[in-house]
Each structure stands twice: as structure tokens, then as C-alpha cells.
Amino acid sequence: MKKSAIIAGEKAAASCYGQNIEQAALIICGDYGADGKVLVRKVLKGDATLLGKPLTLPGPLTMGCRLQPVPPLKNVMLLLRSDLSLVEIYDLPESIGYMNALVPIYGKSQERERLLALLSLYKNPGKVGTTYSGEYKKEFLYAIRQMKEPANFEIVKNLYLDEKVEAKDRLTLSSLQDWLAETQDPRALPLLIGALDSHHKWLVNDAASKLICYFPGKESDAAFAARLQTLPDDLRPMVVRTLLGRGVKLTGGVKLPEATVFQRAEALDKEGKKKEAAALYMQILKSGESNGYILRIAALKCLDENSQAVRERIIKSRLDWLTEDAARGNYLEVTDTARILRELKDERCLKGLMAILPRRDFIFARANLLACLAIAELGKDSARQAANALLREMSLSHKSELSTRSDEQVRLLLELGFLRQAAAMTEAEEFCLNPKNSHWASSYKSLEPLLKALPTRDEGLALTNLLKRQGSQQLPQQAVDFIIYRLGELKEARSTGVLLALFAARPAYGPQTLNEALQSIGGPEIISRMEATALDGKSPVQAEALEVLSNMAPARALPVLRKLVKNGTIEVRVRALAGLSRLGNCDDYKMLAPLADYWKGDRPVHYWVLQARYNISERCRCH
């Protein structure tokens, strides 16, 4: 199979071809030259007079995160905006073939015509020279989400009923059920209720979850109650719990299924009964429970008590598991495990913490930092052991990929720095600046200001001053992220000004880390700035400010959230809906009702409107 010459790099991919077609003002086929010129051989969309003429683009095309130049290519398809900037380029015959079939369809003026043409391709892909229907399924599923005319609901209904007979295409059927449910159209309700009678367990489970979330009401409740005895065994407890929670009276002596220990612990914790909950969380840790998600939550909840006796019980029951998880878990799991190991404050955790240090992919950055801080807090002996292990890794780096990966070199040096071992840093400096190890020199020099500042007594002031000098002496992205996190952890109020300046500049690095640091430091200055920025429709960080304000000052955030739900960019409205989802009340539930209308409401944020209404109704019991 021919491989594409185009490297996508870190560019976000479109969900389907139609998404690109709609963005493009001009779609052409032709020969591309490295000088940025295209000889147009075919025009599929846009100015037909360009046919046979050379077209000069604003500049040579580049690809990938390193902006490598696109090589000269013959027979490529380019999708361009009105200013001739690139939407997408295709060089494979398969992709060009799909586009040749799809562009005329998306050019049809009538929605019904487009949908029926896409449905025809989905069912009969061979008519355009290919027997693979996967791409055409994506196109149809994308197109129905853009549907504006209620009468075209029947197209999806007929396909759903046709496909459901065999339930052979789980992905398509799940996508259709998603769409049916999210419309909250009354015509969808009997279809989803009908799916409860399917002999396909996955179809029943999926339909049940959609009914619970999107169609709370008498019809759904009655449908569930009538089928309690025939529902899958693993689904029945959730349905019973939902019905009883909604006040439905069930016959035949049906009772709420007995909750698991974890469910009981979570319920007590939610009610504020922390001690009773902690006892159950500890019971889980001492049991044979193997679900990592549950174990991490249980450990973190127990550690809220900050008791030496609790820490000792966790070490006795779960240290081996935590150590293994540190070496094998994914980045989210390892970050929580690092937090647990740090809070255990015990030298016996050193092995697990050291297992995290070599995991230097950027997504492990937070786990890396937590492990370093934890080891440093264990004392000089533990820190020395870890530092020596890192120095050995450096000395052997010529035998590994570490010799060419500057980002991982920077991460290792940061690990060394935050271990705060002066002798080890001196040895690292000598190693990096030795001409024999020139591949380390630039990594060290980029971090030198930070590495020299870390040993100072007033860490908060030193780190704050480093950030202030960012304009004249740039630190690597990873280092700045580490500094910001640490300032937040220290609750360093002296850094408020520089952190707010960074926030306003919308840095490319760690926006979430910066948000968390501001929330941790707190104070009226930060709250006032977030409120003003959240109300500033011209601010590039309006959405970020709204989220920080919601987390810091819910009461002050609520009127701002209510205002921005209907105003601003999509990103701002989505953040506002997320805030209302957590903080809103029954009045907000009613206020969002018009926006939840699929056919007349706010379509770009429709999904988040539904989520907000569901969460508010579950929390406040309003319908």
C-alpha cells in the first residue's frame, strides 16, 4: 500500500472529510511545487476559471510539528480557505477518490438530498469504485449531527430500525442511539424503549443508559418497571436504584440492591461523614480488591486523615501494589500513585518513587515532579540514592536514546535539581559541560539559572524571580511548568503578580498547572482579576478565567456563568455550562430548557447543555 508523503505531526485531525470540505472555499486537484505554486488540473469547489492555470499560495506548505516543507507532489488535492491558507492536502488515491465522491454531495443545497446521497454511499460504496464503507459511515454520522430540519429525523429512524434487526454494526448503532438520545425528540423515545427488548445485551445496556440520562420521565420509568425481570443481570441494579431514587413504587418486593463497600464509602463521604467513610475505605485496602481506580481513591481518601497509624496500615496492606503500579500504570494512574506515595512519608516508598523517575514522557511530568519532591522530603539518604541512580543513567546515556532526546535530558536534570543534592548537581554540571558529553551541554545550560536557584533557602522568592526574568532568559517549557506548580504548592503570594501576567499572556505551556497555582494561592486580587477577565469578551483567556473563578469563588461566579451561557465564543459557553453543571440550581435547569431544544436551541453547545441539565437535575432533584 502506498504511504502518504504528508506528515500530519501534532495537527488535530478532522473527524471526517466533510468537516474539511465545509471549511474550504476552494478545492482543487493539481501538481504542487516546492515554491508554493500549484498547477490546477481540476476544480471541485470554488472559482472554476482557475482550471489549467498556475495558482500561487501565500507560501510553501509545511507539515508536522517541525514544519518540514512539503515535497513537490503530482496529482494532489488541496483544500484552501478564501485567503488560500491550507485546510488540508491529500496525496493518496484512496483519499482523493473519497473526496471526488463527497464534494458534489456536500455541494447539494437541500439537506435531505445530502443526507440521502450520503446514506446511499454508506449502503452501496461500490458505486463509486470502492467496497470499503467505513469512511462513508463516518460521513453520514457526521452529517446527521448537522441536521437542521426535523422532517429528516425519519431518515435516521428508518436506518436505525433497519440496522437494529441484526445489530451487526455496534459502532454505527451506538452512534445512532447517541444521536437519537441527544435530540431528546419525542420520536426517539419509542425507539430506545424498543431497544430494551433486544436479544443483544450491549444494545439493551446502551439504550438503558440513554433513557436514564436523556429521557427521565413517566414513560421511561414505566418501560423499565415493566421489564425489570428481563433486563440483563448487571443492568438491573442500576435501573432499580434509578427508579427508587425517582420515587417509583416497584411491585413484587423489589428492593434497592445492596451497595458495595466502595459505594457505601462514597455515599458517606458525600454526606460529610468522613470518619465512617475512612473506615470503609481502609476495609477496601485490606481486602482482596483489585480494581486500581477504587484502590487509589480509597488510599487518597484515607490519607486525608493525615494519621501515622493510617499511613502504616496503607503501607502494610498496599505498598507492594503501589510500587508495581508506579512502574506500570498509565500517566493518570501513576500521578495518583505518586501523590499517595508522597503522602505516606516513608522511606519504604523509595522504590516506588524511583520507578517513576525514568518515565519521562511529557504526560508523566506531574508524576515526575511529585516523585522528586517526595524523595527530597524523605531525607538526605533517600535523595542521595535517587540522585546517584540518575547520575548513573546520565553516564550511560551514550548507550541509549537519552543521548539524542533533549526533552528527556531536561526532564532528568529537573529531577536532579528538585532532589536538591548539591554534590550530585556539581557532578552533573561537570559531566554536562565536559566536551566529551557535548550532547548534554545545551540541555544543562538552558536549565542552569533554575538549577543554581533551587538550593536557596527562600525557594518561593527564588522561583518567583526566575519567572520575572523569563523575558530576558528563557527557561525550557518543562522547567516553567515545574516552577509554576511549585509556587502554587507553596501558596507563594509574592508570585501573584508574575503568575497573573503569565495568565494574561496565555502561555503555550501548562495552562492547567497555572490555573491550579492561582487557585491554590488564592486571595482577593486573583479573584477580582478572574472576574474582570471572565466578563471581558475580548480577552483571549476569558474561558480560562471563568473556570478559575468558578473553582475559587462559586457565589461570585454564578451570575457570570448565567450571563455567559448565552454569550461569547463556543469555548466560553462550554466552560460556563460546565460551571453551571457543578454550581447551578433548579432555576438554572429551567433557564437552560430552551437551549436544550435540538431543533431550535443552541446547537454548537447542545451536548454540554444536556450534560449540565442532567447533572443539575441529579444533584437538585428538579425535573
Image: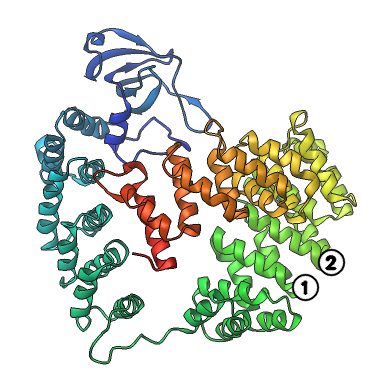
Mark toward the start of the polypeptide (2 vs 1): 1
Q: Residue at x 10, y 43 (%)?
A: 124
Is 174 placed left or right of 165 in the picture?
A: right
> CA gap, disc 2 to disc 1?
8 Å
Residue 29 coordinates in the image, percent (x, y): 26, 20
Near mark 2 (Cα within 10 A), the count class, few <14, some 14-19 or many ≥20, is few
Q: Residue at x 28, y 7 (%)?
A: 53
**Quadrant in the picture for the C terminus:** bottom left
The amino acid on which the numbered mark 1 sits, given as a three-letter code, is Glu
Kindly identify which numbered label has been placed on residue 607: none
The amino acid on which the numbered mark 2 sits, given as a three-letter code, is Gly
Near mark 1 (Cα within 10 A), the count class, few <14, some 14-19 or many ≥20, is some
Is 527 placed left or right of 172 in the picture?
A: right
- In this rendering, the answer to whether 426 lies above or below 243 is above
Disc 2 to disc 1: CB gap under 8 Å: yes
Q: Which residue is mark 1?
A: 347
Task: Give SS at disc 1.
Answer: helix
| Quarter location, residue 91 | top left
**Quadrant in the picture for the N terminus:** top left
Is 268 placed left or right of 410 in the picture?
A: left
Q: Which residue is mark 2?
A: 379
Nearest the eye: 204 or 292: 204
